[in-house]
Image (cartoon, rainbow, N blue to C red):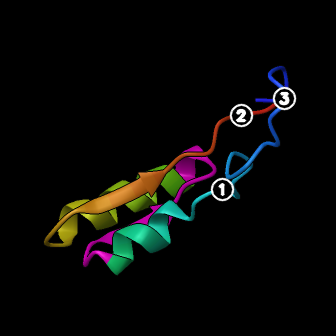
Amino acid sequence: MTARGDTPTAVDLPPVDLPALARAYGGHGTRACSPAELRHALAEALDRPGPTLIVIPEETA
């Protein structure tokens, strides 16, 4: 857009809170930032009826 001389519009969006979105649709959402948190989240997801979304943030170096 900038290369064409257009003003960038609606392209710099904030990150989406995916766990909150999953809960809004009736599922469960959580975030796992370590292997231990992932083990815990998976165990809970398998014991819970319905869908569970687990967000694993990408590693930044």
**Toward the viewer: 58 or 34?**
58
- Give the amino acid at mark 2: Glu
Mark 3 = which residue?
Answer: 2
Which quadrant of the figure has residue 57? top right
In percent of the image, x 42 and y 69: which residue is there? 21
Q: Is residue 50 magenta?
A: no
Mark nearest the camera among 3 and 2 is 3
Mark 1 = which residue?
Answer: 15
**Toward the viewer: 42 or 11?**
11
| Element at label 3 | loop
Instruction: Please report the bounds of the magenta region as a residue range.
Output: 25-36
| Element at label 2 | loop
Mark 2 = which residue?
Answer: 59
Q: Give the position of the N terminus as an image quadrant.
A: top right
- Give the amino acid at mark 3: Thr
In the rendered image, the residue lying farthest to the front is 5
